[in-house]
Amino acid sequence: MYPALAIGDVLRARGHKVLYYGDADRLEGRVAPERGYEFRAVHALQYPRAGLLGKIRFALGLARSTWATRSMLAADSVDAVLGVGGYISAPPVLAAWLRGAGRAIHEANVVPGLANKLCARVAQAVLLTFEATRTRMPGHAPTTVVGVPVNTKILDGNRADAKERYGLEPSRPIVVFVGGSLGAQRLNELAIACARDPQRTYQILHVTGPKYEAEVTKALDPIPSGVSVRGYEDRMGTAYAVADLVVCRAGSSTLAELCATGRASLLIPSPNVTENHQEENARGLEKAGAAAVLVEKGWVIDACVGVVRELASDSAKLQIMAAAAKREARLDAAERAADIVESLLKS
């Protein structure tokens, strides 16, 4: 959603009318309208992983959803559609193909998702985040590596805000734990263990995710010195600005933000994603020298605490990783994506 909105913001600034077609029951259904976008609810089924009957139902549901979305595109006089992945993006892209409208897709991960694999076969342009994805994408549409667009507000943070906002001392190392907007239980477990580490010399900003805040606060009661707990952070630019090290998942948007802000990271890929794509994302940043990777499977929590402690205490290594992350940044991703979408508009 956030990369889509970043591209949409550029297109709106260029004078285009931009609508958001998505799932009204997910985050986009609230955030897109809050950002001033007209929202259209698309109804679609997720692809079943097994069972012939389920796949037949899916195919019929996709056909119905595509036909209904085609009518919406016609009513809105849509000239081009950009699909950003996820099952909800398939009907608008397929409907644009049926109508002869412009159509492009953006793939944020190294391993393309099922919806984008399907839509790539009818797309006129395929936008990628990683070079390695080129050979994994079906179809014959031209591919362009543009990166993942980020909201430029994440660049506005100031380390001096650490004391006022989090009660942390800006002159001492700070490790930020964040599991995404919803939080991640295993990351929270590691953050709690690190907060209790008797050998800890660094400070912690722990963004738990809203549903975990009470649980984490209770587990830490009383909260140790040099630890700040927040359920949600709507100013992630400030969180990144105060971080010497970020411990987080490896979703493509998160990696793009780490690179844009030039932050060293310890990446813990989610194992609960299609084709383990987060680990492949993380390995790419690791190869660039910008991150270390810790895999959940079989981990021993005490050993993981030691990994965080060692990284947080090595300021020279963190500076090298941060510089490597900055070199991987693609701050013009939204503009480049908008250029390609504009090229598909009917003259």
Image: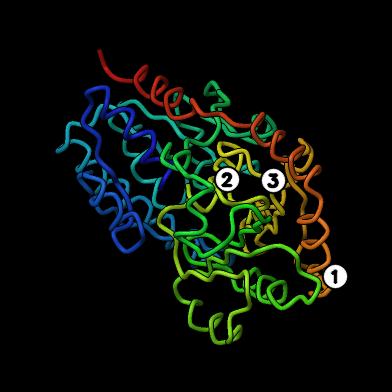
The residue that disc 1 covers is 303
Q: Amino acid at mark 2?
A: Ser
The percent position of residue 176, horizontal first and vertical second, equals: 61, 59
For label 1, the crowd category at 10 Å Cα-Cα, with few meaning under 14, some 14 to 19 and many 20 or more, is few
Which quadrant of the view contains residue 18?
A: top left
- Dot label at residue 252: 2
The percent position of residue 170, horizontal first and vertical second, equals: 59, 53
- Dot label at residue 264: 3
Observer-nearest of 162 and 21: 162
Q: Amino acid at mark 1?
A: Ala
Q: Is residue 145 above or below residue 170?
A: above
Q: Secondary structure at mark 2?
A: helix
Q: Is residue 85 above or below residue 77?
A: below
Which quadrant of the view contains residue 25?
A: bottom left
For label 3, the crowd category at 10 Å Cα-Cα, with few meaning under 14, some 14 to 19 and many 20 or more, is many
Callouts 2 and 1 close, C-beta under 8 Å: no
Q: Earlier in the sequence, mark 2 or mark 3?
A: 2
Observer-nearest of 1 and 241: 241
Instruction: Judge depth for marks 2 and 3 and give the one in front.
Output: 3
For label 2, the crowd category at 10 Å Cα-Cα, with few meaning under 14, some 14 to 19 and many 20 or more, is many
**84 lies left or right of 76:** right
In three-dimensional space, the C-alpha distance between marks 1 and 3, rounded to whole angstroms, equals 20 Å
Q: Secondary structure at mark 1?
A: helix
Residue 51 visible in rendering:
no
In three-dimensional space, the C-alpha distance between marks 2 and 3, rounded to whole angstroms, equals 15 Å
